[in-house]
Amino acid sequence: MRLLVTGGAGFIGSNFIHYALAHTDHHVTVLDKLTYAGNLESLMGLPSDRFNFVQGDIVDAALVDELVGVADAVVHYAAESHNDNSLRDPRPFLDTNIVGTYTLIEAARRHGNRFHHISTDEVYGDLELDDPARFTESTPYNPSSPYSSTKAGSDLLVRAWVRSFDLQATISNCSNNYGPYQHVEKFIPRQITNVIDGIRPKLYGEGKNVRDWIHADDHSSAVLTILEKGLIGETYLIGADGEKNNKDVVELILTEMGQQPDAYDHVVDRPGHDLRYAIDSTKLRTELDWAPQYQDFEAGLGATIQWYRDNQSWWRPQKAATEAKYKEQGQ
Ligand code: NAD
Ligand code: DAU
């Protein structure tokens, strides 16, 4: 297949491209605007006969139409992705996540393409810490932040285009990813690179908030499975049973990096901070026969720490500006 992958220079998109080129014979064209979150270095060394890159904006209808027209399937990762940024300046989230998704699905319906929409568990809002429940495909939408509400809006557009226009689409909602190529604004890379730089890790509030961690490669294998076997119009939740609270994750990072586990600072909490996310991925596992490969979070985290140690030229250009932004917020 000829895949058009939007947002392929970002964290999960770039991991998907490395994974897809290694595990399939698909050809990949990336469409990416190269915002602050996009990095061409993440796509170095890919086979030039099976991969090409186009810099552009997913709200550019003419460009999108041209690229969708020559693809068999679209895998849509491009988004403004960071909750903290959405609290400072929501507008780009509306443009990219809502109008960008609209632009892509209009092109996909015109050309009759297979379309896979990448989304997040955050569309379901949050769960109480002591609630045994997990999110399923039928959990009602209840997003909390400008980021998650625009992702929820984009999911609803895709669902409406399936029903009204027969768009050949599937949707996946995944939990928190970790792995290489993640921007240093995000929790795990921020703390790893802080420790490398001799800065104490920063924990929002008390650190009791729970995230359900999955390795980016497991997200990629799930997306390929859905592309291959998913039923049109269906939503699949992707998760690897990786619930951990933030305090435990920071302490693990510090221990793995040879520091005292309490060598971190508590900083100002995120406004509206979701308490807990938890995914029940039974549908994907039973109906499409998918299973995650990374069962050991400590081992995956250890490999991720090593990647940031070995690839300082990849993240260092972003580090000072990212920390300066956090400092303004007392974080
Ligand atoms: P990211 O911020 O690392 O990357 C986003 C990419 O999209 C960047 O390369 C950026 O340049 C590009 N982009 C942004 N606006 C664009 C536009 N208007 N036109 C073209 N390209 C544009 O994000 P990520 O963490 O890799 O997330 C990718 C997708 O996965 C998003 O849709 C996100 O909602 C979803 N998701 C992320 C996670 C996670 O843990 N990071 C979990 C579940 C779902
Ligand atoms: O659940 C999927 C979502 O995971 C994706 O949709 C988002 O794109 C992705 O950014 C991520 O959202 P989170 O807000 O959960 O991730 P973040 O890395 O920003 O924060 C993870 C947790 O760590 C969250 O509870 C906030 C906390 N945190 C974050 C930072 C940056 C800290 O305690 N300290 C920090 O410095």
Image (spheres, rainbow, N blue to C red):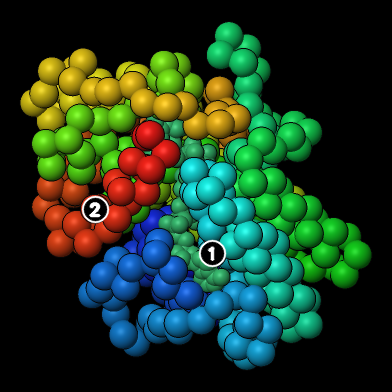
Which of label 2 and label 1 is nearer to you?
A: 2
Q: Quadrant of residue 38?
A: bottom left
x%, y% of residue 57? 55, 77
Tell me: is circle 2 under 8 Å from ligand 2.
Answer: no
Residue at image position (13%, 42%) is: 197
Figure check: 314 above or below 56: above
Tell me: is circle 1 under 8 Å from ligand 1.
Answer: yes
Residue type at tag 1? Ala
x%, y% of residue 319? 25, 53
Residue 302 shown left or right of residue 3 in the figure: left
**Residue where numbered disc 1 is placed:** 78
Residue at image position (29%, 55%) is: 321
Tag 1: Cα neighbours inside 10 Å, few (<14), some, or many (≥20)? Answer: many
Residue type at tag 2? Ala
Distance of mark 2 from mark 1, alpha carbons?
25 Å
Figure check: 128 above or below 87: above
Q: Secondary structure at mark 2?
A: helix
Q: Secondary structure at mark 1?
A: loop
Question: Mark 2 or mark 1: which comes first in sequence?
Answer: 1
Query: Which numbered disc covers residue 111?
Result: none
The outermost residue toward the left is 258
Query: Which numbered disc covers residue 320?
Result: 2
Say if mark 2 contacts mark 1, CB within 8 Å.
no
Residue 152 shown left or right of residue 189 in the figure: right
Q: Quadrant of residue 232?
A: bottom right
Quadrant holding the C terminus: top left
Tag 2: Cα neighbours inside 10 Å, few (<14), some, or many (≥20)? Answer: few
Residue 331 appears anywhere in the view: yes
x%, y% of residue 136? 68, 32
Residue at image position (39%, 64%) is: 36
